Image (spheres, rainbow, N blue to C red):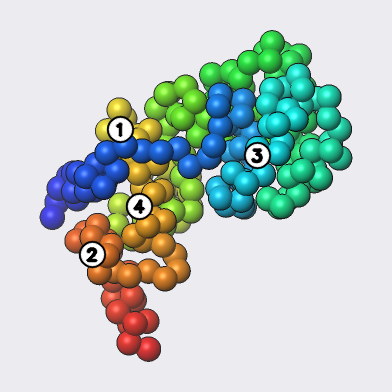
């Protein structure tokens, strides 16, 4: 297959599997999505979705959030991990939203990435999923699959994002990054991987990855 044929195979396969694409983190608006994505760092979406209802019942907007103390927030979100840093970030960015943005989440990468505890990936998720602005946030699933599919060299997430944006049409970025995440979870996980079910890797995957898979299966 040519590179173009591989890309089209990925797009077509993902569209067949995921014609409707759910957003993994439960939220109701840009603010609650921002908080949920911040909380998801080094945690799982499942765990975050278990905790956010408790937090958002008390504060689902920046004005109510700053009425809580950092300690209050930390106690609620403790199960997701890194709660000291995340609670300070949630409180701090909520205060900034009130002071600089009238409580509204700005539609700007620069503004979002200036908030405490908000990096490029979090900003990209909010821009794409809350505002529909083309972005390609790279998580561990996308980073792993872009390497398995021989579409990126796997050096780091920055390079993976650059490669994804280069090879996939811009108008598909927002759908594709979610479709790849769901595919990674269901068909091409890091652990318990079954190549026979992973039709994309089986068809276009990096030869060294497939060889290593079979080698591990035999051992």
Circles 3 and 4, Cβ within 8 Å, touching? The answer is no
Find residue 172 and name its label: 1
Query: Quick one: label 3 or label 4, which is nearer the N terminus?
Result: 3
The outermost residue toward the bottom is 219
On the rendered structure, is 40 left or right of 102? left
User: Which quadrant would residue 20 be assigned to in this image?
Assistant: top left
- The CA distance from mark 4 to mark 2 is 13 Å
Residue at image location 79% in from the left, 38% down from the top:
73
Query: Quick one: label 3 or label 2, which is nearer the N terminus?
Result: 3
Residue at image location 36% in from the left, 47% down from the top:
180
Bin the neighbour count of mark 4 within 10 Å (Cα to Cα): few under 14, some 14-19, many 20 and up. Answer: many
Q: Nearer the viewer, residue 91 or 67?
A: 67
Q: How many marks?
A: 4
- Residue position marked by numbered label 4 in the rendering: 183
Q: Is residue 49 above or below residue 204?
A: above
- Residue position marked by numbered label 3 in the rendering: 52
Q: Position of residue 97 (x, y in %)?
A: 70, 19
Q: Position of residue 131 (x, y in %)?
A: 47, 22
Find residue 202 and name its label: 2
């Amino acid at each position: 297959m040519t590179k173009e044929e591989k890309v089209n195979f990925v797009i077509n396969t993902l569209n067949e599997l995921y014609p409707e694409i759910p957003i993994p983190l439960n939220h109701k608006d840009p603010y609650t999505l921002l908080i949920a994505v911040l909380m998801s760092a080094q945690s799982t979406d499942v765990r975050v979705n278990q905790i956010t209802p408790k937090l958002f019942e008390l504060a689902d907007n920046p004005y109510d959030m700053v009425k809580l103390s950092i300690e209050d927030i930390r106690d609620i979100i403790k199960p997701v991990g890194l709660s000291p840093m995340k609670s300070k970030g949630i409180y701090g960015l909520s205060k900034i939203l009130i002071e600089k943005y009238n409580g509204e989440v700005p539609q700007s990468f620069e503004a979002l990435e200036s908030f405490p505890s908000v990096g490029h990936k979090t900003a990209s998720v909010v821009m794409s999923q809350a505002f529909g602005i083309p972005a390609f946030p790279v998580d561990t699933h996308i980073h792993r699959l872009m390497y398995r599919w021989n579409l990126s060299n796997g050096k780091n997430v920055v390079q993976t994002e650059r490669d994804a944006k280069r090879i996939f049409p811009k108008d598909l970025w927002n759908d594709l990054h979610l479709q790849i995440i769901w595919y990674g979870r269901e068909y091409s996980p890091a652990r318990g991987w079954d190549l026979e079910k992973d039709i994309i890797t089986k068809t276009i995957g990096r030869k060294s990855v497939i060889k290593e898979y079979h080698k591990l299966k035999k051992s």
